[in-house]
């Protein structure tokens, strides 16, 4: 039974860097069975995939965000993290961390509860 | 990157109705297509993986089909708890994408 929990500031100033961490329990970020992903949802809008990381450190990013995004993994803490730089109001959203199944259909079987990040001065 | 287009964007239906939502990929994704249900204020929930495999605990009134570029999510007899927004997601390419969502509302 996997559990994921996002943490980080709920308010970020324009042009600064948004930083979030996802703490994983009930599973290991070192496992080759999973991808660890970030997804966001602007208020009242649909889901946008941000990127994912494999235990090896291999990453893939949404091409529209690629120049501003970094996802990393900390196996010692069983966490993975998101950094999004040069944020604007358009980056205001609920940010979810999630677990995807590798070796399957890349379905996302566990999600964090989500954390609202507002970009405002 | 692969674009996912859902239709309709929203629909109104009554309890007991049969509901069909479609998802089209901009290129073939084999059967690497997953469906999620999201209720207000909650994280999405996985309903179907691999186009047609129902997840454990998901009612059998939900079904999925399709392969290649065209996929369908069907709710055979809509229940009150099914009013929600549904998203498709492709896992075929290294960069995943979601459809824009279909909101199922009460008629």
Image: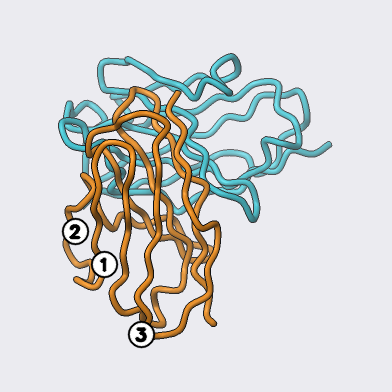
Chain colours: A cyan, B orange
C-alpha span from label 2 to label 1: 8 Å
Residue A65 lies in quadrant: top right
The numbered mark, 3 or 2, whose residue comes first in the sequence reads: 3
Residue A111 lies, in percent from the top left, at 37, 49
Q: Is residue A7 left or right of residue A79?
A: right
Instruction: Please report contact status of discs 3 and 2: CB closer than 8 Å, yes or no.
Output: no
- Residue in the foreground of this view, choosing between A86 and B72: B72
Q: Which residue is mark 3?
A: B16
Q: Are marks 3 and 2 on the same chain?
A: yes
Q: Chain of mark 2?
A: B
Residue A72 lies in quadrant: top left
| Residue B75 vertical position relative to residue A113 in the rendered view, above or below | below
Residue A31 lies, in percent from the top left, at 18, 29
| Mark 2 residue element | strand
Q: Chain of mark 3?
A: B
Q: Which residue is mark 1?
A: B62
Q: Residue at x 58, y 23 (%)?
A: A64
Residue A9 lies, in percent from the top left, at 62, 39
Q: Which residue is mark 2?
A: B54
Q: Residue at x 39, y 31 (%)?
A: B96
Extreme right residue here?
A121
């Amino acid at each position: 039974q996997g559990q994921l929990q996002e943490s980080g500031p709920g308010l970020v100033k324009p042009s600064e860097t948004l930083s979030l961490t996802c703490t994983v329990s009930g599973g290991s970020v070192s496992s080759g069975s999973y991808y660890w992903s970030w997804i966001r949802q602007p208020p009242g809008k649909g889901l946008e995939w941000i990127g994912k990381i494999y235990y090896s450190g291999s990453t893939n990013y949404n091409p529209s965000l690629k120049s501003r995004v970094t996802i990393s993994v900390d196996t010692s803490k069983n966490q993975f993290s998101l950094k999004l730089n040069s944020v604007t109001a358009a980056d205001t959203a609920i940010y979810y961390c999630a677990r995807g199944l590798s070796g399957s259909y890349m379905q996302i079987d566990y999600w964090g509860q989500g954390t609202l990040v507002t970009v405002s001065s | 990157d692969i674009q996912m287009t859902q239709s309709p964007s929203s629909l109104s239906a009554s309890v007991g109705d049969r509901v069909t939502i479609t998802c089209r990929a901009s290129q073939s994704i084999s059967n690497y297509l997953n469906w999620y249900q999201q209720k207000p204020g909650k994280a999405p929930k996985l309903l179907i993986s691999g186009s047609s495999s129902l997840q454990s605990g998901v009612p059998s009134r939900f079904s999925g089909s399709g392969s290649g570029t065209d996929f369908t999510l069907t709710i055979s007899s809509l229940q009150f708890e099914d009013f929600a927004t549904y998203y498709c997601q492709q896992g075929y390419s290294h960069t995943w994408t979601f459809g824009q969502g279909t909101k199922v509302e009460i008629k």
